[in-house]
Image (cartoon, rainbow, N blue to C red):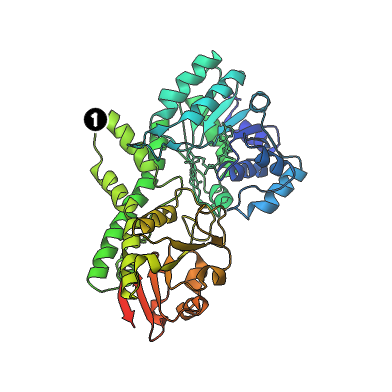
Amino acid sequence: MLELSGESLKKALRGGEITVSIIGLGHVGLPLACAWATAGARVIGVDRNESVVSMVNRGLNPVRDEPGLDEIVEDLVLANRLKATRDLPTAVRDSNVVILTIPTGVKWNEPGKPLDLMILREVLEDVANSMGRGKLVVIESTVPPGTTLNIAKPLLEEVSGLRVEEDFGLAYSPERIMSGHAYEDIVENYPKIVSSVGSKSLRAIKALYEVIARKGVIAVSSPIVAEFEKIVEGIYRDVNIALANELAKMAQALRVDFEEVRAAANSQPYCHLHKPGTGVGGYCIPIYPYFAMHVAMLEGLDLPLTRLARIINESMPEYIASLTLKAISTLGLKPGEARVSILGLAFRGDVGDTRLTPTYDLIRHLEAYDINDIAIHDPYAGGGSAKYPLYRSLEDALRERSIIVVATDHSIYKNIEPSKLIEMTGVEKVAIVDGRDIVDFKKLPEKNVVYVGVGRPWIIKL
Ligand SMILES: NC(=O)c1ccc[n+]([C@@H]2O[C@H](COP(=O)([O-])OP(=O)(O)OC[C@H]3O[C@@H](n4cnc5c(N)ncnc54)[C@H](O)[C@@H]3O)[C@@H](O)[C@H]2O)c1
């Protein structure tokens, strides 16, 4: 396919003549599989998880945070455009394009958080072992800058015995999705960034994504630019959130509402302050700064601002725990007597994803203060902490608990009146620690309540 013109490739994709393997059918891979299949490709999704494969083959969507995919997956499977398998070698052999959307990351619990690209290396090796001439391999997982040229290219060439650009194509194209609306993000919302190791691969990847992404394609000059671009998006947000967290603490000290300050500041086009909060979770934003710091270190460079942003954001759960401790003592309780309800286990509002959620760190810091009577509420997240109950019902999570800590910005916590929250506790005096500044503090009852937000002053009405 490398020899085909851009127009011929587009025609082949639209005409159902291109088969694509997508390896890793998770938050990124499944919506991407749907986008390719909708554009006309025959898609083989490859995943090592048997239940993912079996669900997809039954027309069911295994990605809990993407309810919008339910119907699309069902339709595509029924139309024979999408199927799933654990058999990577056969899928690769049967495909023209092989896309990698498997996890990449760092060893989060090890000192220095070293890179963890083991799955990527294994999958590249498996692909290389099954790869014949003429295929286009596309990496779409987020990777440290330099990975495509320095790891993927030599590994694929050495294991397959084939030459890139002569025998097969190699491209890198980062995913720019946000859980909850991933399919729309790919198909409708953003231009697709594409890059490759040579002109033939670039022509192919560019033509194919011009069919899939309605906002078009931005072709950058090399994979390292695209790899770096992706982590820069994450670092920008991490640093911005760290700044918001720092300024939110200052607003609290000045006894003003940071949300009011932020809204006023952001009315000017050069200010884009993000929101402060309990912490930054998920497998993207907290990890990409470490990708950058590792690569920078190899270049003999320190990234103090990126590093400091991580320190600030990783300290937020501890900060919220310290506000909780103070709220407990303001109610006249000892930490060991406090009955706490944490609202939100997911790392972000209105999704159920709990990967690297700050709520777990918050619990750890509460425990360090001897606060051990904890219930968790989340309408979307599963799992939970082995130690503490996780409730779907707000009433059950709040019953007879006088300390409410909002950890996630689920809309339900924003839309409910604080007096209703307090009523559900059935307790006379209640403290609310708003780790996301979403409770409507202007509607607090006139007495028996203590309130503090991450960027909001203390309100004590006892
Ligand atoms: N989730 C996001 O919002 C997002 C956004 C942009 C980029 N990314 C990046 O995309 C990549 C994938 O992330 P994700 O969120 O989709 O991960 P995920 O955990 O949701 O999905 C990964 C899938 O890969 C499968 N898998 C793991 N090892 C495998 C193997 N050896 N062979 C076959 N399948 C395997 C898993 O079973 C899982 O279904 C990561 O690099 C991530 O940083 C994620």
- Looking at the image, residue 47 sits to the left or right of residue 197; the answer is right
Q: Which residue is mark 1?
A: 300
Relative to 175, does residue 391 appear above or below in the rendering? below
Residue 393's spot in the image, x, y percent?
58, 67
- Which of the 4 image quadrants contains residue 445? bottom left
Q: Is residue 223 above or below residue 134?
A: below
Residue 210 picture location, percent across and down: 56, 41
Q: Residue 53: x and y, percent?
A: 68, 39
Report crowding for label 1: few under 14, some 14 to 19, many 20 or more residues within 10 A (C-alpha).
few
Q: Is residue 27 visible?
A: yes
Picture quarter with the N terminus: top right
Residue found at x 29% / y 34%: 296
- Does 30 sit left or right of 150 as displayed? right
Q: Nearer the viewer, residue 417 or 218?
A: 417
Choose between 128 and 434: the one closer to the eye: 434
Residue lying at 66% horizontally and 48% vertically, measured from the top left:
61
